[in-house]
Image (cartoon, grey):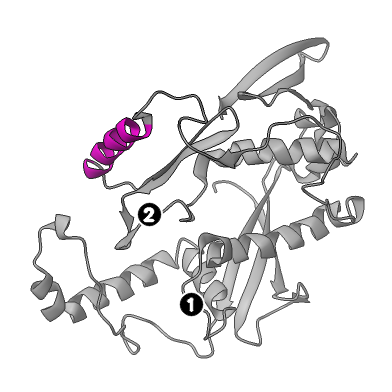
Amino acid sequence: MLGDYKIDVTFYTKEYGVVEKPTDSGRYGAVVKITAEDGHEYVRFRTLYKTKHRMMLSFNNPLDGELMFPSAIGVEELIWHNQRQSVNDYVGFAIERDIQRSHDFAILLAGVSEMSPQQEAVSQLESAITKDRQWWLRLKRKLNGNAERFAELTAAPLSINGLNAPVLREGTEEEAGMKPRTVEKINGILEEWANDSDQPFNVCIARRSIVFFNQGYGFRNGQPITADTKHLVFSITKALSGCLLMMFIDQGSSAWTIQWEKYYPSLMTKVLKHLSLFITSLRTLLIWMVTLPIRGTTLSMHTVRLTHI
């Protein structure tokens, strides 16, 4: 940052206690408040990790082991094997550079340090990144007051009797009303697609409440993709978030029209404090109707299309 500004840092232990300096090894968090010359305050959250002893990976504690690189790089496997120490030295230097500008390595160290030695390879749901987000979520809820405002956990999903809704079940293409050999034709197209791509994927198709096609294609880390393989969710989180928001509304934790300052007090500015959120559609699009004061007097409705689900 440029100009006259003030930096105030509060350090937290793994158990969310405030400390002046680290003592035990493990996870810590830093809440950094930056006050600019005009009085505007910026807040940044950074994960920290304290090792048992001061160390540098690139000198006194060189990395050991062997990395296997993709053949697409164009270097023979035996060369990587013979020159593995050069590779390890590079990785060590790269980590040393990275920790000067990012907290990503601290997130990894904190996460794996909290895992059990008997724990096998974890999925994204149990990864170091997920652990870090969960840790910060609890601290942010404490800092912004949401832990008190929304103390009760949301029970989801709830079973509701009496609703007339279709239930998906597995069946054949004939039961789904599809033409003969539809599954064969779809599978042929998808196999061709998978053979021409390095991205694995799953395809699930249902008609008339019948799941007549559900298969995985491609490989990840040398393992074939099946219908039960877990993937990173990426863009479908928007659909999941939309469903979760509707559950909040059903249970009275939220409403169709809400004020930002109630849920996101840390985002409030002179403009955002006048902002209201109105959900208009969660069927095929997530659309937010935003009401903003224009020039202090006129209200204008703006429809913002975030993305398709």
Which mark, residue 225? Answer: 2
In the image, is residue 308 above or below residue 138? above
Magenta residue check for 232: no
Q: Give the amino acid at mark 1.
A: Glu
> What residue is pinned by disc 1?
120
For the C terminus, give its image quadrant.
Answer: top right
Query: What range of the chain is rendered magenta?
Result: 183-196
In the image, is residue 171 above or below residue 27? above
Which residue corresponds to the image point at 52% horizontal and 39% vertical from the top-left?
A: 171
Q: Is residue 306 left or right of residue 104?
A: right
Task: Mark 1 or mark 2: name the one nearer the start of the chain.
Answer: 1
The quarter of the picture where residue 268 lies is: top right
Total count of labels? 2
Q: Residue 159's spot in the image, x, y percent?
A: 82, 45
The secondary structure type at the circle numbered 2 is: loop
Magenta residue check for 191: yes
Query: Cα distance, mark 1 to mark 2?
Result: 19 Å
Please say whether residue 268 is visible from this viewpoint: no
Prevailing SS of the magenta stretch = helix
Q: Nearer the viewer, residue 265 or 155?
A: 155
In the image, is residue 100 above or below residue 307? below
Local crowd size for mark 1, using a 10 Å CA cut-off: few (<14), some (14–19), many (≥20): few
Q: Give the amino acid at mark 2.
A: Ile
The quarter of the picture where residue 239 lies is: top right
